Every structure is written in structure tokens, then in C-alpha cells.
Amino acid sequence: MVRMKSRVAAVAIMVAGLGASGLTAGAARAEIKLGLGAPLTGPNAVVGEQLRRGSEQAIKDLNAKGGVLGEQVVLIQADDASNPSQGVAAANKLITQGVVAVIGHYNSAVSIAAAKVYSEEGVVQISPGSTNPQLTEMGSHTTFRTCGRDDQQGEVAAQYIAKNFPKARIGILQDQTTYGRGLADATRAALAKLGLKEVVYEAVTVGDRDMSSVITRMKDAQVDFVYFGGLHTEAGLLVRQMAEKGLKAKFMAGDGIVSNEFWNITGAMGNGVLNTFGADYRQQPVAAEVVKSFRAQNYEPEAYTLYSYAAVQAWAQAVTTAKSTDPAKVADALHKGSFQTVIGPLSFNAKGDRTTADYTVYQWRDGSYTEVK
């Protein structure tokens, strides 16, 4: 891992080299480097694109208004490919390039691994999509997220199930990732508090294409409600193959399936699928102008796009409050302040979590998801 002192030395050498080449200080343009850590390739590249689009547009809009502290902001990107080891490498890459804060990552396991690097190096991290509680339970003063937590999401799912399917024979599945297992277990615990016990608890493996064995076990147990902790690809395959194999069970998942890619896998078989997610800010007046701007570019700002945009907004406003890009001062400002963003007023508690939770239940129909009233 690269350390601060080595980076300072590297910068000093670079400056000396510039001086030797005859460049003057006045020729350089002041810029603030903001990092993006995201799955730009791999199984969740579609979500990485959301993080990239949201961050880029927020920075573009900031710069059009004069930037931050009178300086322009530039986005430095690093691909984590949804892999924790690659996430650590991405974190080190961003740090060596001199970023003062990072928007990212998406996958909880990646964010948790990278957070240790950012925390040690004193760099602010704001995740738009990592919901596992462990991320902010590690005690880092510089770690934040604009999304909610799985224990909050699991409570909403469990309450919905208990109210609407009180006699269901429940099967709980998870994909063995930090996110998927964590969400499934949080929902399982919340169901237990409400007096509901699953009849099947099974795991699938990310990358598996054949879900027949776990579907057979659920059919044998007469499961009629399936809760899945995992992402859109495995969820889509489960829904499709359940229908093909005649398992007529209601299917529910979390925010990991909020992607058009889910529908691309299921087609009409995805009609009626439920999921939890935060409020759809595309429908809120506070985000109207930004949403209009995205749509003018023929881009629909779904899922984590606006969460990423809001992360940049919160960071920029905290920098303005702190009158500095120094990460320690910015982190203090983030913990103490309230920020106006495209996802509404945003503030953080001592752990770096949002002080408000807005999870609700959605249902898929004909390629889109709408809130269940």
C-alpha cells in the first residue's frame, strides 16, 4: 500500500521535474481531484455506469457554476470489477493520483475492503450503493454512504411479507456475497421477530446459470414465497427458471435487482416481482432539473445514478463549509452538516450513515418498477 509520505515525495519530484523543464507555476491550472471507484467492467458494469454517469454529471454541473473553492473538479476513475482485491488496487490507484475523496464503491464487499485503505490514508469515501452495515460499523471517521443499510431494508421487507403473506411458506435464498448474505440474514432476523420462520434457507453461487437444484428443494418444501438476497443476474435467472419449472411462488428481493438488466433476463416472467429500494427521486421536484438533463442525453437516471450525484453534492457542500479540501476537515463537515441534494436533504450520523431511511416496496410490471401503494 502506498503511504502519504511516499506520495508527498513523489509530488515533490514531479514538481522539481516540471521546474527543470521550464514550466512555470502560473502555467498550471488548479484542479481538485475527485475519485470514482466502481465496477466499470464485470457482472455489475451496468451499475458502474450509473455511478459514473451520476458523478460525472454532478461534477459537470458544479464546474459550470464555478467549481469548488474557485477550482474546477476533475473525476479520476478506477475499475473494481466487483472484486474486493481489485477494489483495493483501485483504491490505491486513486490515492496515488492524489484524489481528496472517492465516490464508491457499489458492492459491499468491495467498499469494505477499500474503506480500510481510504481510512488509513485519510481519504473521504462516500458510497452510493453499499448497504451492508459493516461498512460504517468499522468506525472510520471518513466513511459515508448516501444509500441506506440492509438492516433497515430487511425490516421493510419483513413487515411487508408479514402483513401481506402471513401464512406463506417462505424460502430464503442468498448468493454468498457480503451484500446478498447480509441482506437475506437481515430479512430473516426481522421475519423471526414477527413470528415468521422460513421452511427453506439455501445459497446459490454468483455466476451459476442452472438454478434447478435449489428450485427442486423449494418445490419439495412447497415454498410459495421466495426472498432473495443478491443481484440482478442471479435473481433474473431464478425468476425465469422458477416459472419454467412450475414453481408458482411470489418472488421478492432487495435493491440489488433495481436494474433494467433484471427485466432483460426475465421478460414477462418478471411481472409481479417485488423489491425494496429507496424513494424514486426521479419523481421528486428536487431532482426535476437534473433528471431532465439526463433524459436530454437519452439516458434514464435509474437506481444509483442520483445517489451518486447526491454524493458529489454533499462532498462539495462540505468542502465549501470547511473552506478546505482537507479530508479530515471535510469529514467533520459531513458529520455535522445538512446538505441539499437531488435525493432531498441529506445528513449523516456519527457512523457515516444517513440519518433518515426511505426504503419502500416496489413491484415490477412490463419492464419497470413502481411503488406498491
Image (cartoon, helix red, strand yellow):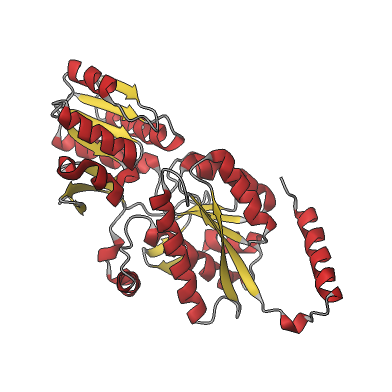
Circle count = 0
Write the residue at 75% across / 50% down.
Answer: 3
- Residue 234, given in percent of the width and then of the height, sits at 32, 35
- Residues 294 and 328: in front is 294
- Residues 190 and 282: in front is 282
Left or right: 248 with respect to 195? left
Write the residue at 47% across / 64% down.
Answer: 55
Residue 275 shows in this picture: yes
- Residue 297, given in percent of the width and then of the height, sits at 34, 71
Which residue reaches farthest bottom?
26
Q: Quadrant of residue 163?
A: top left
Image vertical order of residue 293 relative to residue 310, above or below: below
Write the residue at 45% across / 69% down.
Answer: 58
- Residue 128, given in percent of the width and then of the height, sits at 44, 54
Write the residue at 83% across / 69% down.
Answer: 17
Residue 137 shows in this picture: no
Q: Quadrant of residue 309?
A: bottom left
Left or right: 17 with respect to 1? right
- Residue 226, given in percent of the width and then of the height, sits at 23, 30
Which residue reaches farthest top?
220
Image vertical order of residue 242 relative to residue 344, above or below: above
